[in-house]
Every structure is written in structure tokens, then in C-alpha cells.
Amino acid sequence: MIPYSRQDISEDDIRAVTEILRSDWLTQGPSNVLFERAVCERVGAAHGVATSSATAALHVACLALGLKAGGRLWTTPNTFVASANCGRYCGATVDFVDVDPRSYNLDPARLAEKLAQAERDGVLPDVVVAVDFAGQPCDWDALAALKARYGFRLIDDASHALGATWQGRPVGAMPGADISVFSFHPVKMITTAEGGMALTDDAALAEAMRLYRNHGITRDPERLRGEPDGPWYYEQQLLGFHYRMTDVQAALGVSQLRRLDEFLIARRACAARYDRVLAGLPLEVPWQHPEGVSSRHLYPVRLHDAGRRLAVFEHLRGAGIGVQVHYIPVHLQPDFQQYGHGPGSCPQAEAYYAGALSLPVYTRMSDAEQDRVVEVLAEALL
Ligand SMILES: *Cc1c(COP(=O)(O)O)cnc(C)c1O
């Protein structure tokens, strides 16, 4: 089976993990600090908060930004459900902004229209979550300009985009983004088996996210509200969660991050080769914004004849090729339809989804494997 994506674990990665297993410290500890610093350095952010998943990072990000019951979060429909669920965990209502038909990212023009209407109706969003779909950065300058005009807080769900750049700047420190989130699930750019990280330049937001990550508990003498009655003293200052990353995972993250450039080169070469060899087939290869450089986490093609997508998918799967579909528009999920979302609310995302197919792309994909994917795809399409 050729998978749509897979992790790339080296002997050095394994050594990094076994070293921690032989040490005294397994849970969140010194390796977490090293991993947070390394990711911050890589992307040029001031503070990193490692978590058990990107989903947890999105949740603590929303909490730190003050999202509450009755608040409003807007996001793109073309994403994994976690980008929207973080709002619902806080009791906020979630709404969706349709995508740009070329990049499949949240469309700043649609966002501008929706914000103008919301301002008239007095229902502006508190938080907007933009997603760098497939690893391609959103138009961060346009998003930052709208943020400045309307005053919402902005989260970059950069789960796909570690290593990507916008106007030469690394994703993770985009203009306007209050908090950026990476995922380290095995199919993503680097892995910690499970894990995520929230990054910010704002020390107070970082401190709040650390508190929410660990039951709302602090031992920091500077922050205590009560009088310690002994050295064991700690305080729960708010209702937090257990969202910590283990040091076993963080050590794997440190080791994987050293290999990010190698991973980016391999994925970009793979994508560039698809761009060449797929020319002439009845499909759109992923359009690339001239001001961004994608990490190429995914290679989503769009079939011209959406009516054949199911047959093409089944033909490829039947030949042992692990194609996927990213994403079922979140607003069409039954659990979101109960809030009044449904077919027709985001026509561009729905039209894209109808013909969408993610072709395999991973660091160790060989030319022969790629040729096989293209051969079977052509067979199905022609
Ligand atoms: C993978 C992913 C997530 C969730 O990541 P986890 O680490 O599995 O929680 C969130 N948003 C997007 C866009 C993703 O692709």
C-alpha cells in the first residue's frame, strides 16, 4: 500500500527517545523546554507551549484569548473539525467563511463582506481561525488588515504548514496572528506521535496557555494569590485541563525538527514532480500563491469531472494507493448542521470538495511509487 502520508523515523530519532526512557524524567520536563525553544527559534516566535495535540493547543489558545460562552468564532469549512471545535469547547457559536477557489484557503474577500454585514448586525466575531491548507499560507497581509479594521483576535491553525513561508517569513509568526498552532500527528510535517504546540509573541497569552495546559495550577511564587502554608503549596487559579506533552514525545520532536529541512526538500520535490507529470490530465494541480512557499503537507488535486471522483478514488484504492479526501466541509457535518449550517452556505468549499482528491506525498516516496500513482490515476481518468 502506498499511503497518502507517513512519518519518517530515523535511528537518531529512536536514540533520542530511548535516551529519555532511560532518564529520570518522562512527563513534561526539560525536553519540553528544549522542544519549545527549538520550534520558537525555527519560526521566529517568542513563546512556545507544547501540548498533547494541536486540538488541545487550539483549545487553550481560544481560552487564553478570552473566548467564552456566547462568543463567536469564525473559521474555514475546508479544514479538520478541530479548527472549529475549539470554539465549541468554549461555548462559542461557530460560523464559516467560504474559501478562495484557487488556494482553497479562507477567502479574505468573503471575510471582508461577512465582517461588514456582521458589524451592521452587531455580531462581529471574537476569534477567527485561519488554516494554511495543505501547507500553503493564507494571505496573511489581507487577514491582518481586516483584523486591524474590525478588532477580532486571529489564530493561525498551521497544523499543515511547519516550514512554509509567506513573503519569506516562516509560518508560526505571521502578521496579525495572535497565536499559531502546529500539529505533530504522524502524517504532519514532523511528528511526536501525538502532540501540538501553540506559539505567540505575547508573554501574557503564553502564561495563560501554560496555566490552562496544566489544570490551571501554578507554583510560581510571583503568581500565587494566597499565602503558602508550606513548600508543597500550589494553587488552582482557574479550571484548566491535562494537556501536557511527555518528554518522550518532546525528545522525538527535537530530533525530528533537526530533519525538517530534509523533509521539506523531499516533499517539495515530490510536489514539483507531480506538477510536471500530471499536466494534461483532466484535473487542477494545487495552485500556489506567488508570495507563499508551501510545506506541501498535502497534494490536493481537483478533478474537472467531480462526478467521477468516487470511481477514481475506488480505482486507486483498489490498486493499493492510499488516496484521501481533504476535507468534508465542516459545516456539512451533522453535528454542525444542528446549528443551522448546511448545503449552500459555503458554495466554493462544497464545489471544491466534490472533486477533491489528495494524492500520496511523503518524504520517502520514490519516483517509481509516484509514477505508479500517476499511471493508475491516468488509467482511471482517461
Ligand atoms: C491535524 C489537524 C488538527 C489536529 O491535530 P491533532 O494534533 O491531531 O490534534 C487541527 N487542524 C488541522 C488543520 C489539522 O490538519
Image (spheres, rainbow, N blue to C red):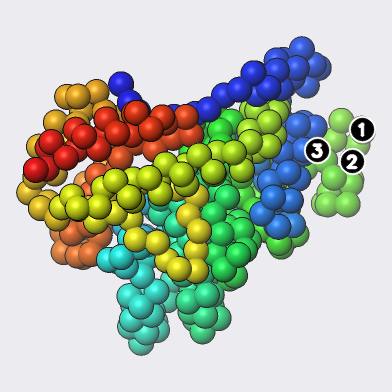
Q: Secondary structure at mark 2?
A: loop
Residue 247 lies, with reference to residue 341, above or below; the image says above
Q: Which quarter of the rendered picture does the N terminus lie within? A: top left
The answer to whether the residue bearing label 2 lies less than 8 angstroms from the nearest atom of ligand 1 is no
Report x, y in % for residue 10.
61, 22
Residue 59 lies left or right of residue 379; in this view the side is: right
Decide which of 55, 139 is in the foreground and name it.
Answer: 139
Q: The residue under label 3 is which amino acid type?
A: Tyr
Q: Earlier in the sequence, mark 2 or mark 3?
A: 2
Residue 178 lies, with reference to residue 141, above or below; the image says above
Disc ID at residue 231: 1
Between the C-alphas of marks 1 and 2, the distance is 7 Å
**Which label sits in the foreground, 2 or 3?**
3
Disc ID at residue 234: 3
Q: The residue under label 2 is which amino acid type?
A: Pro
Disc ID at residue 228: 2
Report x, y in % for residue 361.
39, 38
Report x, y in % for residue 226.
84, 48
Decide which of 345, 283 is in the foreground and name it.
Answer: 283
- Residue drawn at the location 14% of the way across and 31% of the way down: 315
CB atoms at circles 1 and 2 under 8 Å apart? yes
Q: Secondary structure at mark 3?
A: loop
Decide which of 11, 120 is in the foreground and name it.
Answer: 11
Report x, y in % for residue 303.
17, 51
CB atoms at circles 2 and 3 under 8 Å apart? no
> Going by the picture, which residue comes out furthest to the bottom?
120
